[in-house]
Amino acid sequence: MSPEQAIEKRHQLIRDGFCVVDGILDKYFLQELRIETERMMEDWVPPPDFKYQGQHVTAQGTENPIIQKLLDWPATRRALEQMGLGDFASTGGVILLTKDPGEPALYWHQDWMQWNDPMSCSPWPQIIFVSYYLSDTSRENGCLKIIPGTHLKRIPLHDQLVPAHEQGARFIAEDHPTMFSDHPDQVEVCVKAGDLVLADARVLHSAHRNLTDERRTLVLAWHRRPDTVPAYWTDPVPAFIAERDPEAEYPGSRIPGELLRNV
């Protein structure tokens, strides 16, 4: 990426809640990851309540040298540094996420778990998911769907959703009229194998059903940064954050509260 492209990617991540970095994995490491992830999933039997999330196999870099190689991948670190996101660090593990042939869609949700913390209203990203795609994606095979801007702005859908994952969404019916709906503001994030998607944990996202006869695979690594104002930030800091007590403990919550506003 040129310096100008990197800054535009950061602006998109801040504005829309996601961005795509093309071709982050070279063809040799891409193939190595395909082989290793298939090996890791070979004997895995996902629990029935994970049917919307696919295989959902977790792995730590300390226990798998290929996964550690991915977490340390120089091209990713270089891209983050170019974008001014060099203070983001991996949490040390990954999740293998698939859409196998015929598997149902993934429901609408967001992954922020700290909605009582004033940091929830930060206009910059604090926690991001870094997704490496091992397959080309399309609407037909279960591409990602995102509603841009929903990491910063409350929309009616926020208050209509069943809480994510283990708090309810894993147990809903496949024909739930809201959780699997199309939204007029959604965008379909279709990528090529080897591409990288960066997305804010707070943004509303889901994925289409896989209507093809081939598995769609990605490797997701959570990254987070310190609870400080980023060095690149020159706009005003919201009062909620400027007055935040860094020593306070805030109860965790998956449900957006008053900090997510209709602005």
Image: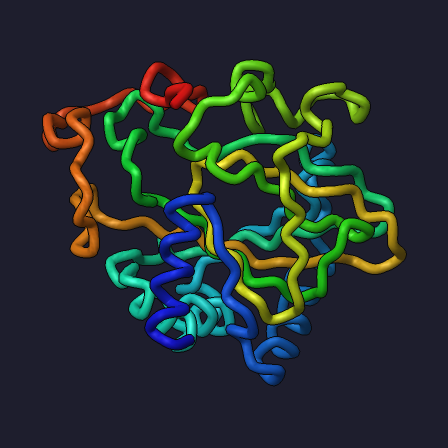
77, 215: nearer the viewer: 77
Q: Percent from the top left, x then y, of residue 74? A: 39, 77
117 relative position to 103: left or right: left
State the residue lying farthest toward the bottom.
28
Q: Is residue 215 above or below residue 176?
A: below
62, 186: nearer the viewer: 186
Q: Percent from the top left, x then y, of residue 33? A: 60, 72
59 relative position to 77: left or right: right
245 relative position to 16: left or right: left
Q: Where does the N terminus fall, quadrant-wise?
A: bottom left
Q: Percent from the top left, x then y, of residue 196? A: 53, 63
**Residue visible at 72% across and 28% down?**
180
Give the number of marks: 0
**Residue visible at 17% across and 49% down?**
234
97, 64: nearer the viewer: 97
**Residue visible at 79% across and 26% down?**
174
Q: How is the image coloured?
A: rainbow
Q: Is residue 19 above or below residue 253?
A: below
**Residue visible at 81% across and 48% down?**
210
Q: Is residue 208 above or below residue 109?
A: below
Q: Percent from the top left, x then y, of residue 171? A: 69, 22
When asked about the image quadrant of residue 63, the answer is bottom left
Q: Where does the C terminus fall, quadrant-wise?
A: top left
